[in-house]
Image: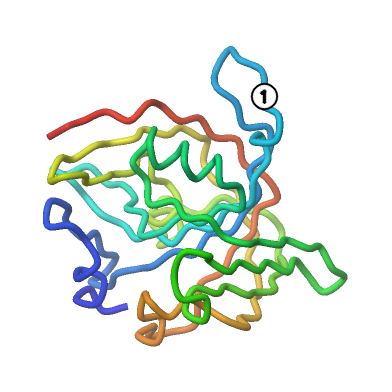
Amino acid sequence: MEKEVIQELLPPELELDTYRGKAWLGVVPFKVKNMRMRGLPRVPYLHTVLQVNIRTYVTYKGISGIYFLTIDANKRLAVWGARIGALLPYRKASMRMTTRKDGIHFQSVSRELNQDKEKLDILYHPVSNAYTPSLNSLENWLFERYCFFVVHHKKVYRGDIHHDRWQVKRADVKINHLPTNFRFSSIQNEPLCHYTRKKQAFAWILKRIH
């Protein structure tokens, strides 16, 4: 998308990151499994949750990271905990993820805003073998991000994350409905779609950096 379209969605403290002059929005639906705090057992009910995040790519003082525009989840306690503990823009949504013969059907409808505008409905399936994107590729630029930024009351916070390099498969997606409040109508080319069956990640406590 044109960078001016995304820039309007960012707090002034963060700088939009671009790849060859273009800005990107990521739509990431997934299922969290076996979530827990280090050294503690899984919390019943909360260790598995469906989520979808809409994100863009930013820098702060030269550090590349992610900025979440929204994160929807299907369990209210998870939403409250992330809002309070990580200051992230979580919202409660009704979600369903179904594996079918023709792919994975993911549906999400936010309960907090206009439901007609906050609906995600996609069907996707992998179409290639798994591979690790090359270091200079757009895919590597999108995937290999190891922190996210939050701006709260003009204060900047960073959440560090760790994972090994992504292995992905190319995917086909049928888009039945996308949220309309992030100007997806401004998309200039076909979506770039990927699939991975699972990914282990670690996250650290949010820390203020400015």
Badge 1, how many Cα within 10 Å: few under 14, some, many 20+? some
Q: Residue at x 38, y 36 (%)?
A: 84
Mark 1 highlights which residue? 42
Residue at screen point 51% across, 56% down:
72
Residue 194 lies in what quarter of the image? bottom right
Q: Nearer the viewer, residue 28 or 22?
A: 28
Residue occupying image coordinates x 61% and y 66% = 108
Which colour assignment does the render follow? rainbow
Pick the residue in front: 154 or 6.
Answer: 154
Name above or below for residue 52 compared with residue 180.
above
How many marks overall?
1
* Vertical placement of residue 115 versus 41, above or below: below
Left or right placement of residue 89 versus residue 91 in this view = left
In terms of depth relative to the viewer, which is nearer, 124 or 205?
Answer: 205
**On the image, which quarter does residue 58 sit in?**
bottom left
Q: Position of residue 182 (x, y in %)?
A: 36, 75
Task: Point out residue 80 in the picture as x, y percentages from the top left corner.
Answer: 47, 41
Which of 81/193 is in front? 81
* Residue at the outermost top position: 39
Left or right: 68 in relation to 132 = left
Residue 81: image x %, image y %?
Answer: 47, 36
Which quadrant of the figure contains the C terminus?
top left
